[in-house]
Amino acid sequence: MLPEAGERAGDPSSPRERRPDAGPGGTGIWRAAGEGPPAGGRTRALRGLGGFGVLAGVLVALIILPVACTAGVGARDAADWFQSEPEGLDTGGVPQRSRILAADGSTLATFYYENRVDVRLDQVAPVVRRAVLAIEDSRFYEHGALDSQGTLRALVSNLGSGEVTQGGSGITQQYVKNLLFTQAESEEEQLAAKEVSAARKIRELRYAVALERRLSKDEILARYLNIAYFGGGAYGIESAARHFFSKPASRLTLPEAALLAGVIRYPYAYDPVRRPAAARARRDVVLGRMAELGWITRAEADAALRRPLGLRVHNTPNGCVTSFAPFFCDYVQREILTNPVFGATRKERERLLKRGGLTIRTTLDRQTQRAAQRAVDRHVPRKNSARKAAAEALVEPGTGEIKGLVVGRRLGSDRERGKTWINFAADAGHGSSIGMQAGSTFKAFTLAAALEDDMPFGTRLMAPRGFVPTGFRDCRGRPVNSTTTLRNSADGEGGRTFSLVTGTHHSVNTFFLALEREVGLCETVKMAERLGMRRADGKPMSQFPSFTLGADQVSPLRLAAAYAAFGARGRYCEPIAIKQITDASGRRLRVPGARCRQAIDKGVADAVNHVLRGVLTKGTARGMGLGRPAAGKTGTVDDFSAAWFAGYTPDLAAAVWVGDPRGGYRYPMTNVCMDGRCYGPVFGATIPAPIWRDSMVGALAGRPATGFHRAPGRYFSKGSGEDRVDLPDVRGMPVREATARLRAAGFQVRVGGAVPSAEYPRGTVAEMTPGPGRAEPGTTVTLRPSEGGGDEPGEEPGSTPEPDPGNGGTPVTRPPLPPLVPPGPQRPRPGG
């Protein structure tokens, strides 16, 4: 059967033709939307609408008379049935595209089933409305749901042939047909929506009559303009204007409006990009029709006819591949598709994302994202010759907001070098990654558990060269021991005692195994869990002695969120990417929150911060400071299978992983060359820490620095925990020279009152407390200058000698020793 008169057949060979692109014809006079009918037209319009029900019923009955008579149904019964309200008439559910926005409101990505942006009628240029109605239905504002002239013309044809061969479809009917096709859920429903049959035609007519009762003409025209397909993947006049001319529909000119109006009938045949000659000829037909109706002057038409098409094609991306932040975008997409808060089934959630017209406002900070991407690409290029990869997650302490999420690849099939679909920065549920072993970054959780147990910084434990893990029990009280000897990652680290501070700074494996046994394996695991840590595959954390060495596979995002809790003084927040979602009507939808809680005491977090700050100044990441208060921890996985760095300020936390996606143990981070830069064994400080530093410096540029809080005094009860160094003997030296010598060696200096001394000349140092020997760096040394003379060298008559904490409380007054040369700073060997 041939297509109905006034309807577009479409081109089934076109991949763009998804809907029955119907377009009516018609003649008569039209008024611009909102202007009121022409003189005398208002009465005719009201009279036409008022008497339309009976007339329409009779006309429709006559149109389908051959079919009705065959079924034994009379024309009067058909007319009565036709005037009744149809069931299931739903004018909602038209697909609209969704947008993901960065924190500053800029667009990160769009998602759509049909690329459509609904607009009000007053947001469409009047010339566009005139052009569409001129070529589609010029009597739209004068007739009802049925154009009687067109219907009578079809009636004559149908009565002569005995079947439906023609139809006088107007704008309302075409809107109905597009609506029914758009709402079809299955292929079967879509075929039924566009089949050429009397049943389908009558259903459309009944819906059209009902809509004319419910809606004004302006509302129907607006809905038609928003639902019509214009080709090039553009649904609705707004998307069409942006696609073909890179401007909104409100700014379209006469020749542009005529071009789009002409396209509606056959979008593929009149495609301005593929068939510019046919499109121009069709545009000129529209201009001629507008002039014929008197809606533009002949001069305006002639001027428009001379204009070129003037296309400025803009293709709207669909999905995350071309996004500024593709892996963050992918994280947001997966959050919506997997979280039941957005729908009971995945199909419902996908429908919401691709058809719901959502505006998704996210937490992403463009400055942070840009800085992180540049840092990752600089140190681990996307197509590097070693095929290594990097990933980084950046989280705001105290809110859980993900400010940046970077993978050192482009989003796409890994069949092409430098691309991957796997989001290495996120858990499996948000990126298909099963995670990576975190190495020594997990030692921070053991440290936090020890500090929560009120261990002072000066607590010292023996760190043997080899540690056989015995004496461990899991949270169910079961022994979890091993006969495998665990060792340190750097030669010479071990065989002596370390404090909480120095063991952390040097990242000594055997020290932390001993510390984990001291505080309890279960307590260490629970500390990590309280700080949000879980395996990337969703399974519970392991409970084995190697837990403190980072044997579990986790994501950078989880680790960054845990370290962010330290920066927020113990306040942990679940990482979140979505701040707000509104649907097409502006209604706010429920979104998952950060569920912030005080995971550890503020004082414990302050103490952790105190220790981890030293990693950047005197530990395994020395030299990686930011020029503002910062703390962090390196991580090197067994056999150099991967390297990590996690660090933070009170304003931003980040975790960086560098490894080989093909398998770290098979392709370890040793003797690695990437685009001309070669490395021996890669530690956490070798590549991950510089990525972290560059990311943080760029992300925090222009933002005021925030300091950490001082650790509670109870943690200093056994001293600062720093390793003791040689304290030079400055007795007999001038006070100013002695002061400079001590400060250069890393000590604080206080000058006390002068004392009589027969041994040292007046004005030189007669006493120092503590005396020469070994002392912790930063210790305050009190100097007492000589007055000369005296009954007892170094002692004032009647006074009590000041105790020397570094020498058992005995005052030091012995003759001067040869001056010691203070040792230079020793860089600790990498160890985590």
Image (cartoon, grey):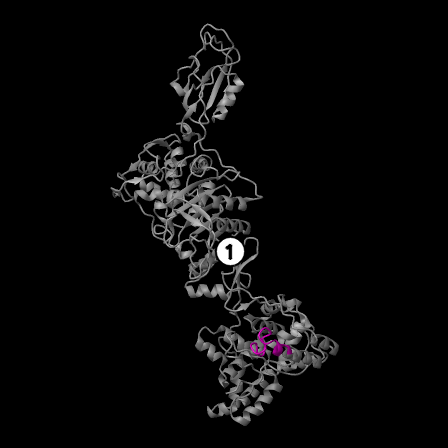
> Is residue 306 within the magenta segment?
no
Residue 431 spot, x, y in % from top left: 42, 57
Instruction: Kindly give the residue lying farthest to the top in the view shown.
Output: 791
Sort mark 1 into few (<14), some (14-19) or many (20+) by Cα contacts within 10 Å: many
Residue 490 lies, with reference to residue 113, above or below; the image says above
Q: Please determine whether, in this image, residue 493 is positioned above or below residue 417.
A: above
**Main secondary structure of the magenta stretch:** loop
Disc 1 designates what residue? 325
At horizontal 57% and vertical 43% (from top left) the residue drawn is 703
Judge from the rendering whether residue 807 lies leftward or rightward of residue 84; answer left or right.
Answer: left
Residue at far bottom of view: 160
The residue under the point 43% across, 32% down is 826
Q: Give the range drawn in magenta.
A: 264-280
Amino acid at pointer 1: Ala
* The C terminus sits in image quarter: top left
Instruction: Report the label total.
Output: 1
> Can residue 464 be seen here?
yes
* Towards the viewer: 137 or 320: 320
* Residue 285 percent across, percent down from the top left: 66, 80
Residue depicted at 56% across the width and 70% down the height: 234
276 inside magenta stretch? yes
Which residue sits at x=34%, y=36%? 511
Q: Which of 510 and 364 is in front in this view?
A: 510
Q: Give the x, y percent position of residue 283.
A: 65, 77
- Residue 128 visible in the current orientation: no
The local secondary structure at tag 1 comes to loop
Residue 417 position by quadrant: bottom left
Q: Nearer the viewer, residue 82 or 461?
A: 461
Please state the horizontal and vertical placement of residue 541, each as a whole percent of the image: 34, 48
